[in-house]
Image (tube, rainbow, N blue to C red):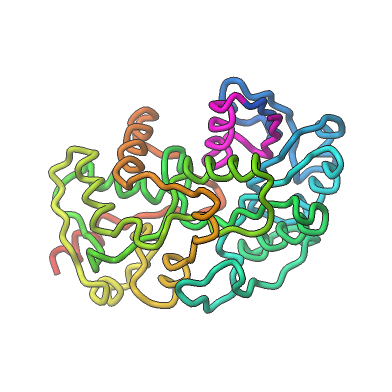
Amino acid sequence: MRLLVLGGTKFVGRVLAEEALARGWEVTALNRGTQPAPEGVRVLVGDRTAENGLAALATGEWDAVVDTWSWAPAAVRDSARLLNGRVGHYAYVSSRSVYDHPLRAGADETAPVVPSSPDLTGEVPYAEAKRGAELALEAEFGGRALLVRAGLILGPYENIGRLPWWLNRIARGGPVLAPGPRDLPLQYIDGRDLAAWTLDAVAARLGGPYNVVGPAGHTTTGELLAACVRATGSDAELRWTDAERILAAGVEPWTELPIWLPPGELYDFLHGASVARAVDAGLRCRPVAETVEDTWAWLRSIGGDAPQRADRPNVGLDPEREAMLLRG
């Protein structure tokens, strides 16, 4: 299989390239060349936001392309137009953020999506950017476009900082503010399971939208944080704290306490998706302990500080605020 990866050096793109190489596929990646790609990848240099930024793709044929672009959808429109006729299948790592609010728990791929356009340029909100890219691919590739609507993605190479923050915080030890309820179900996917499913789907020539995230309740907040304690070997003491008290103190869910959302509409949106279609197409998810242990091993291998995407805010609770809340 000849695979073209648009990206291929960071988080999901890197995991996709590594998984394809492990399968014996021939992998080409187009990126800006600012970071090394996995060994064995043929790198083409190009900047999709620049004039003539796709010149390196003017020739060549591939069985499939996987694209992880998250910004203005016109870049996906342009690559789709350029590659149509020279690529058999186009997979796009989209997001469940394309669904319109409010979204009921258990919603599947038929739920309403946000309005957008494939022609948007400049600064575009995340949901509209992902949906605009989907529209561009549907227009160019029709049923040969696979729309991988991912949820929360964790695992090695994470460059948002969510699971790395929890691991580093728990590794420091001592009392740790643990947001309740402890048995709150979580829905996420390890980036490696996302990559494996996507490449399987590409090989099977699947098309259309799929919610690709672990089943709702694959783990809980309590299981996730307990796995962090075990993986780090820390003496951390998880101090479970009611959501109401945390919110009353002005702590921001999702950003100051990464991954965590209190029960409610946004929680239902992010942690209550139906993934029956992806499961029927072969989605399998590894245990949370494996994701946590492997992420901790990766963090230690790079010195403990995870890379951070420049377009995303830093996450994590200030130590002084945490201590104040723990004191009551």
Is-magenta flag for residue 105? no
Residue 104 location in percent, x, y? 48, 77
From the image, which quarter does the C terminus lie in? bottom left
Q: How many marks?
A: 0
Q: Is residue 255 left or right of residue 86?
A: left
Residue extending farthest front: 280
Q: Is residue 94 left or right of residue 104?
A: right
- Taking the spot 32% from the left edge, 43% from the top edge, the residue there is 292
Q: Is residue 18 above or below residue 52?
A: above
- Taking the spot 66% from the left edge, 28% from the top edge, the residue there is 27
Residue 250 location in percent, x, y? 32, 72
Quarter of the image for residue 38 reads top right
Question: Depth check: 74 or 309 in front?
Answer: 74
From the image, which quarter does the N terminus lie in? top right
Quarter of the image for residue 64 reads top right
Is-magenta flag for residue 19? yes
- Taking the spot 78% from the left edge, 61% from the top edge, the residue there is 118
Residue 176 location in percent, x, y? 19, 55
Q: Is residue 85 above or below residue 268?
A: above
- Taking the spot 63% from the left edge, 31% from the top edge, the residue there is 34
Residue 44 location in percent, x, y? 73, 28
Question: Depth check: 157 or 40 in front?
Answer: 40
In magenta, the rendered stretch is: 1-24
Question: Depth check: 1 or 184 in front?
Answer: 1
Q: Is residue 177 left or right of residue 136?
A: left
Question: Depth check: 322 or 59 in front?
Answer: 59
